[in-house]
Image (cartoon, grey):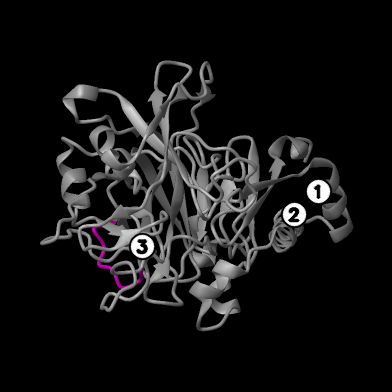
C-alpha cells in the first residue's frame, strides 16, 4: 500500500468530460490511497472569495482575449466555429484525474472508499481561512419554467459560507440575478450556458440578508465520481451513466464505498463537482458548489472473483455504507448505447422519473435475487415494506432514483 497526492493543476484537471483517451495523471495499485484536490467549476460566480489568491485556481480559470488555459470545456467539438466556446459546454464539471489502477480490465469492478473530505479555504487575505460555495438556480433547474414571481424566467446565484465548527453548516451570504455576461472572446452569455465565465460583479446587484437565521447541516460530498466509459472518446459529465459520473447523491460521503463497473483498461477514475450540502433532487440545478479535497482508497475486484459476493453480476454503480446498500436508477441505464449515435444530445430531451424508478426497481430486484438468493416474490415484498426509493436528482439530463435497503433487515440471516 502506498499513499499518493494528486493536486488540482492545469495538467491534472479536465473540464466537462470523461475520456478513455486521456493519459493517466497518476497510476496506482489496488489498496493504495490518494489525496485528490478538486476546484468547483462555479468558482467564478464570486472570483474574490473562491479564486483570488489561489495560484492553482487562478491558473486553471485564466481566460483573457490572448489566453485560455483550459480551452476544451465540454465533450463537444474542439475546433470551431463555435457557438459559445471550445467543447460547447456539453459537460460542465471540472474534474481531477484520471487515475489509472494497475491491472484493471473491462468486467472488473473498482471499489472507491471515501475516507474523508474537507473544504479548500479561500486564499484571498480578506477571507483567509473561510469556505465559500455557490448555488445557482439555473436554466436547467426543475423550477426554471415554473416560477410565480417576476421576472420570469430568471437565474439567481446564491453565495453560501460553510462553517466547519461542529456541527458543520452552511448559511447564505447574498444572492444576485444573473445578468448577461460577456466572455473574453466577446461571446455574450444571456444565461448560464458555458462553464468558467467570470461574473462581473459591476453588472449585478447583490441582495443581502437572505435566508436570515437559516443554517443547513453540511453534507460534504463529491457530486461527480466515476470511470471512463468505453462507448465514445469524449463523454459529457452532465448525464450519469453505468460507470458512475454525475450522480449527485449526498450519501456518497465520508465512510461510503462506491463500486463501479470497469469499462476500459486502467479504469480511469476522475472526480469533482464537490458540494458543501445538497438535498435530494438538487432541484434548482445545483447544490452548494464548493472546492473539496478528498481522501480515497482504491480496491480492484477482478471479474473472476465476483461470484458469491455483493458484486456478482454488477453492471451499474452500487453504494455501500455500514448501514445500507443503494442502487442507482436512471432514465436510461446505458444511454450511450440506447439512444444511438446522437446520444449526448438526445439524453438532454429524454428525462423521465418513471423510467428511473423502473430502472432502480429492476436493479434492486436483481441485487436481492442474485446476492441474497431471494425469489422474485420475496424480493418484491421486501422492497415494498423495507426499501426506500429517493429522487436523487432531476437536473442532470439522465434523472436519478436511488433504491436503498438497510442491512439490518438481514441481521437474522
Image x and y of residue 60, in percent:
20, 51
Q: Which residues are magenta?
A: 19-27
Query: Mark 1 and mark 2 in contact (Cβ < 8 Å)?
Result: yes
Q: Please indicate whether residue 295 sits to the left or right of residue 370 in the image.
A: left
Q: Dominant secondary structure of the magenta stretch?
A: loop
**Residue 383 circle label:** 1
Number of dots carrying numbers: 3
Looking at the figure, which quarter contains the N terminus? top left
- Label located before the other in sequence (3 or 2): 3
| Residue tagged 2 | 368
Up-down relation of residue 210 to residue 234 (above or below): above
Label 2 CA crowd tier, 10 Å (few <14, some 14–19, many 20+): many
Label 1 CA crowd tier, 10 Å (few <14, some 14–19, many 20+): some
**Label 3 residue SS:** loop
- The quadrant holding residue 55 is top left
Which one is in front, 274 or 200? 200
Q: Please indicate whether residue 382 sits to the left or right of residue 400 in the image.
A: right
Image x and y of residue 50, in percent:
28, 36
User: Visible in this render: residue 100?
Assistant: no
**Label 2 residue SS:** helix
Image x and y of residue 332, in percent:
63, 68
Looking at the figure, which quarter contains the C terminus? top right
Question: Of the residues tagged 2 and 1, which is closer to the observer?
Answer: 1
Image x and y of residue 336, in percent:
53, 74
Residue at 52% across, 16% down: 213
| Residue tagged 3 | 268
Q: Please indicate whether residue 392 sits to the left or right of residue 301 in the image.
A: right
User: Visible in this render: residue 305?
Assistant: yes
Question: Of the residues tagged 3 and 2, which is closer to the observer?
Answer: 3
Which one is in front, 64 or 376? 64
Residue at 49% across, 49% down: 138
Which one is in front, 254 or 41? 41
Amino acid at each position: 500500500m502506498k499513499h499518493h497526492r494528486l493536486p488540482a493543476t492545469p495538467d491534472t484537471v479536465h473540464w466537462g468530460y470523461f475520456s478513455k483517451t486521456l493519459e493517466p495523471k497518476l497510476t496506482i495499485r489496488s489498496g493504495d490511497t490518494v489525496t485528490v484536490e478538486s476546484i468547483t467549476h462555479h468558482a467564478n460566480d464570486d472570483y474574490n472569495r473562491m479564486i483570488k489568491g489561489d495560484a492553482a485556481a487562478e491558473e486553471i480559470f485564466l481566460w483573457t482575449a490572448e489566453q485560455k488555459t483550459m480551452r476544451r470545456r465540454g465533450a463537444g467539438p474542439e475546433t470551431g466555429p463555435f457557438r459559445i466556446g471550445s467543447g460547447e459546454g456539453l459537460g460542465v464539471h471540472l474534474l481531477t484525474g484520471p487515475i489509472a489502477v494497475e491491472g484493471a480490465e473491462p468486467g472488473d469492478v473498482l471499489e472507491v472508499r471515501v475516507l474523508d473530505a474537507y473544504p479548500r479555504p479561500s486564499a484571498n487575505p480578506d477571507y483567509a481561512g473561510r469556505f465559500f460555495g455557490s448555488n445557482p438556480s439555473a436554466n436547467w433547474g426543475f423550477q426554471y419554467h415554473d416560477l410565480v414571481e417576476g421576472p420570469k424566467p430568471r437565474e439567481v446565484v446564491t453565495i453560501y459560507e460553510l462553517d466547519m465548527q461542529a456541527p458543520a453548516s452552511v448559511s447564505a451570504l447574498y444572492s444576485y440575478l444573473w445578468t448577461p455576461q460577456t466572455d473574453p472572446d466577446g461571446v455574450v452569455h444571456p444565461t448560464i450556458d458555458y462553464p468558467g465565465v467570470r461574473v462581473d460583479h459591476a453588472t449585478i446587484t447583490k441582495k443581502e440578508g437572505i435566508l436570515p437565521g437559516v443554517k443547513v447541516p453540511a453534507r460534504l460530498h463529491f457530486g461527480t465520481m466515476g470511470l471512463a466509459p468505453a462507448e465514445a472518446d469524449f463523454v459529457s459529465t452532465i448525464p450519469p451513466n453505468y460507470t458512475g459520473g454525475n450522480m449527485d447523491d449526498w450519501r456518497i460521503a465520508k465512510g461510503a464505498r462506491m463500486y463501479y463497473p470497469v469499462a476500459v483498461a486502467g479504469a480511469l477514475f476522475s472526480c469533482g463537482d464537490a458540494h458543501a450540502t445538497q438535498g435530494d433532487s438538487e432541484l434548482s440545478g445545483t447544490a452548494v458548489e464548493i472546492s473539496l479535497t478528498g481522501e480515497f482508497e482504491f480496491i480492484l475486484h477482478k471479474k473472476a472473483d465476483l461470484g458469491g459476493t455483493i458484486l456478482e453480476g454488477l453492471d451499474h454503480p452500487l453504494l455501500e455504507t455500514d448501514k445500507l446498500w443503494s442502487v442507482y436508477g436512471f432514465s436510461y441505464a446505458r444511454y450511450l448505447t440506447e439512444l444511438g449515435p446522437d446520444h449526448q444530445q438526445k439524453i438532454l430531451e429524454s428525462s423521465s422519473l418513471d423510467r428511473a424508478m423502473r430502472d432502480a426497481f429492476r436493479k434492486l430486484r436483481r441485487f436481492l435475487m442474485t446476492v441474497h438468493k431471494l425469489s422474485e416474490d420475496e424480493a418484491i415484498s421486501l422492497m415494498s415494506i423495507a426499501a426506500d426509493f429517493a429522487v436523487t436528482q432531476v437536473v442532470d439530463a439522465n434523472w436519478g432514483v436511488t433504491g436503498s435497503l438497510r442491512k439490518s433487515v438481514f441481521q437474522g440471516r
